[in-house]
């Protein structure tokens, strides 16, 4: 540290006092550690932004406290200051706000001549503000509906506001009351919850460091209060600084050291067990919408929040995808069905469904897919991929899409066949005219594409005159593909008259399998499609798409697998699609001569694609037949397989049911045997009193257990259907009342045998009373 810094510290110590300077330094240290920990665990919290929030928040809290503001006035003032500051910085309203102020100064100097400029700048400001508010409205609407959405800007504003309020709160309480625990408790609670929820082991270290600073603050505060009491009482000052400093610093160091060792201990599992015992529930949807992601614990395929830019796609365990918003897509001229019509289903929604493609795969090896890159070609902004292109070909529709990417990936995402991009881009070709993927560094771009605009009749009339390159690349299957997979494909398509009907038959068959995001990866040395169809019989999009492409190829249909994203959520306010990472999807495409690649949706979790029928050139599709015995429909497979398993494991199932019943009885009544006998009788008779109240028998002042039992017996006597039941009930009631009376009045205590007898009596009485009440 240089001399000017030393002089500054000495001046601050003389100006405010050494204890005050040390106190505020420890507060800064604690809040800084907490914010560093949150920035480590929450992507929406940035280190630089957190530093400025800490600096300005502590200053604002001190000023509000020194100004003698009451709490009910300081709180809204702090919220207003923080909201304005965050909107100007994180919300990016500083530039349009500055433009409005400059235009206002122009009006003051030039008069009416500056009004058009002010009007223009004010309109720009309102547009920016409306866009920001629409993003807030969408976030709150989706979060309130119980779904998950993460808009990076909204999440950053919400977390910024939370950090601001925590720092202002801490500074206000330290300035007013010197209450370190009250000041830091909200921030520590947030850090502890985020660390527990995300499962980040480093959270324990940050929590321990902040706790150590809190211990030092508490020790310093206690020492200052003791000094003040000594001064008021005019007592001699005790020289305890050394011992107090040693004890407090030692405790703080011990706490921090323990925090450094805790990451090797799985405290999260212990916390989860305690939470399960307390039956606590977490609002996971809201937490994920605020940018909190649990640390993945299951092995699975690695998939980033952006597009999938790999040359190999393996069928692995289902990944855990976040709800981070990664794309905004606006399609020119797209007009969906009004929400009211969709809600009540009065009108059929004919709006097209979009799939935002990223990459295509053509070669299947039994475990996954690969793409073979051949050549790369660069294109200038606006340059078309098809120089010979003229008018839009029949069966295709030209669309214009504006895409805004919120990730750092450079893979272009779009719907349909790419024609041109308004930014410089380059394309990887598999062969001439066969694109694998396209790239551009622009985060916002406009693309022109061609989308299939065909009817079912046109697809049925497409025929089978496939180009040689299509046949060579997109009918490939591994030599070791199990024969029963080919048999299923042939059984499904044997009676279908056209390639389109064959594709629909395969799609319909696969949509009968249940969707399961937790489906495991195929075992080693097993074909993924064979495992999916005959053993797993459930899965997620990679399984469905792979199975459809393989079955289509086995039936003679050129097919490929495409990865990208499903449509996402259409925001009515901004008139654009909001796509999150969890919308990552894989689907199948079938080639039709004269038309091109057409999407099919075999995944059961998404609605099937509806196409206009057009002028029917053929009869309706022949019903899908039942496949051979080795395959079968999903319903037949479930019946055959699960009934066989049920018969095989019926004995174990019966033992399991008995074990569950025994465990329930142990948890419900076993604890009664652990109490002292007298306490057990008191608990049982209190329960009997509550049951008697349901039949109108109230306790009377000074009434004895025998009087209560007599009134209950008289009340229920007309309700018994059989005299033996009444006699058995009254005998058990009399016996239990005698035991309870001994507890109240007799000097001889009950023994364990009588305790067990009382529990059995209570169980029989409760069963009969409940049966009588239901009758």
Image: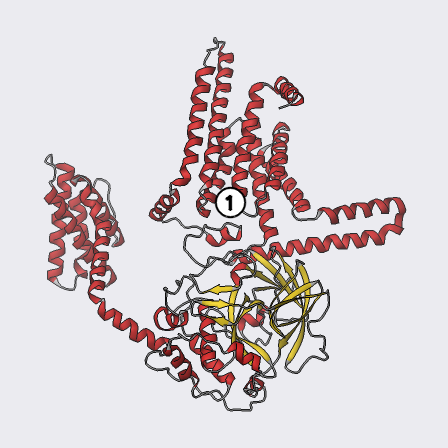
Q: Position of residue 379 (x, y in %)?
A: 70, 66
Q: Is residue 330 visible?
A: yes
**x and y percentages locating residue 443 in the rendered image:** 66, 58
Does 716 sit left or right of 126 as displayed? left
Indicate the quadrant containing the C terminus: top left, top right, bottom left or bottom right. bottom left
Q: Is residue 397 left or right of residue 548?
A: right
Q: Nearer the viewer, residue 53 or 335?
A: 53
**Residue that appears at 63% across and 41% down:** 82
- Relative image position of residue 26 (x, y in whole percent): 54, 27
* Direction from residue 364 to residue 721 in the image, left or right: left
The colour scheme applied to this rendered structure is secondary structure
Please indicate whether residue 311 sits to the left or right of residue 572 in the image: left
Q: Is residue 405 above or below residue 566?
A: above
The residue at the point 66 percent across, 46 percent down is 87
- 519 vs 748: above or below: below
- How many residues crowd mark 1 within 10 Å: few (<14), some (14–19), many (20+)? many
Give me the residue at 42% from left, 80% from top.
Answer: 489
Residue 603 visible, this orientation:
no
Q: Quadrant of residue 256?
A: top left
Callout 1 secondary element: helix
Q: Is residue 69 above or below residue 291?
A: above
Q: How many marks?
A: 1
Q: Which residue is mark 1?
A: 41
Q: Nearer the viewer, residue 233 or 681?
A: 233
In which quadrant is the N terminus drawn?
Answer: top right
Q: Position of residue 690 (x, y in %)?
A: 26, 49
């Amino acid at each position: 540290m240089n001399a000017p810094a030393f002089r500054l510290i000495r001046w601050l110590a003389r100006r405010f006092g050494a204890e005050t300077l040390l106190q505020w330094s420890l507060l800064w240290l604690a809040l800084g550690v907490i914010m560093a920990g949150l920035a480590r665990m929450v992507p929406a919290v940035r280190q630089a932004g957190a530093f400025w929030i800490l600096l300005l928040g502590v200053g604002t809290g001190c000023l509000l406290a020194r100004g003698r503001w009451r709490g009910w006035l300081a709180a809204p003032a702090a919220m207003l200051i923080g909201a304005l500051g965050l909107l100007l910085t994180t919300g990016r309203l500083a530039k349009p706000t500055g433009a409005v102020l400059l235009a206002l100064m122009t009006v003051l100097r030039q008069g009416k001549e500056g009004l058009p400029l002010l009007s223009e700048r004010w309109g720009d400001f309102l547009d920016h503000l409306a866009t920001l508010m629409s993003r807030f409205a969408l976030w709150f609407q989706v979060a309130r509906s119980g779904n998950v959405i993460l808009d990076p800007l909204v999440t950053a504003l919400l977390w910024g506001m939370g950090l601001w309020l925590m720092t202002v709160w801490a500074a206000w309480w330290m300035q007013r009351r010197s209450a370190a625990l009250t000041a830091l408790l909200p921030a520590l609670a947030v850090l502890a919850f985020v660390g527990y929820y995300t499962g980040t082991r480093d959270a324990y270290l940050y929590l321990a460091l902040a706790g150590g600073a809190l211990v030092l603050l508490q020790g310093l505060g206690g020492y200052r209060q003791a000094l003040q009491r000594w001064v008021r009482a005019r007592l001699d000052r005790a020289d305890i600084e050394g011992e107090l400093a040693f004890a407090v610093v030692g405790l703080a160091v011990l706490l921090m050291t323990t925090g450094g060792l805790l990451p090797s201990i799985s405290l999260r599992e212990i916390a989860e067990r305690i939470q399960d015992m307390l039956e606590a529930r977490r609002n996971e949807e809201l937490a994920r919408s605020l940018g909190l992601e649990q640390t993945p614990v299951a092995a699975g395929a690695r998939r980033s929040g952006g597009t999938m830019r790999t040359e190999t796609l393996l069928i692995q365990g289902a990944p855990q995808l976040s709800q981070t918003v990664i794309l905004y897509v606006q399609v020119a001229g797209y007009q969906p069905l009004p929400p009211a019509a969709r809600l009540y289903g009065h009108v059929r929604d004919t709006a097209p469904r979009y799939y935002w493609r990223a990459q295509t795969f053509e070669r299947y090896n039994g475990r996954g897919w690969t793409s073979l890159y051949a050549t790369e070609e660069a294109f200038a902004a606006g340059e078309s991929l098809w120089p010979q292109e003229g008018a839009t070909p029949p069966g295709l529709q030209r669309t214009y899409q504006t895409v805004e990417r919120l990730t750092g990936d450079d893979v272009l995402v779009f719907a349909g066949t790419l024609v041109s991009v308004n930014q410089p881009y380059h394309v990887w070709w598999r062969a001439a005219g066969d694109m694998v993927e396209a790239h551009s560094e622009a985060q916002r771009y406009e693309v022109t594409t061609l989308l299939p605009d065909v009817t079912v009749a046109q697809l049925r009339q497409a025929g089978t005159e496939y180009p040689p390159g299509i046949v060579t690349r997109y009918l490939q299957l591994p030599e070791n593909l199990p024969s029963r997979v080919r048999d299923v494909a042939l059984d499904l398509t044997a009676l279908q008259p056209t390639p389109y009907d064959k594709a629909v038959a395969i799609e319909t068959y696969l949509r009968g399998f249940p969707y399961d995001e937790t489906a495991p990866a195929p075992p080693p040395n097993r074909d993924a499609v064979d495992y999916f169809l005959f053993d797993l019989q459930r899965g997620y999009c990679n399984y469905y798409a792979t199975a459809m492409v393989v079955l289509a190829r086995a039936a003679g249909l050129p097919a490929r697998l495409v990865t990208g994203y499903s449509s996402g959520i259409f925001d009515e306010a901004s008139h654009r699609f909001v796509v999150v990472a969890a919308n990552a999807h894989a689907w199948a495409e079938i080639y039709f001569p004269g038309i091109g690649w057409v999407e099919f949706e075999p995944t059961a979790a998404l609605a099937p694609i509806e196409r206009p029928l057009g002028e029917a050139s053929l009869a309706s599709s022949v019903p899908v037949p039942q496949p051979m015995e080795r395959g079968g429909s999903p319903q037949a497979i479930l019946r055959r397989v699960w009934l066989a398993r049920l018969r095989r494991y019926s004995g174990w199932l019966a033992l399991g049911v008995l074990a569950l019943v025994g465990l329930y009885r142990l948890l419900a009544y076993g604890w009664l045997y652990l109490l002292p006998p007298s306490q057990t009788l008191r608990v049982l008779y209190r329960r009997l009193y509550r049951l008697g109240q349901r039949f109108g028998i109230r306790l009377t002042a000074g009434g004895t257990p025998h009087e209560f039992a007599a009134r209950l017996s008289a009340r229920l006597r007309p309700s018994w259907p059989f005299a033996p039941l009444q006699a058995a009930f009254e005998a058990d009631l009399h016996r239990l009342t005698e035991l309870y009376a001994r507890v109240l009045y007799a000097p001889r205590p009950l023994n364990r045998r009588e305790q067990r007898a009382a529990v059995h009596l209570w169980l029989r009485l409760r069963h009969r009373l409940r049966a009588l009440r239901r009758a």
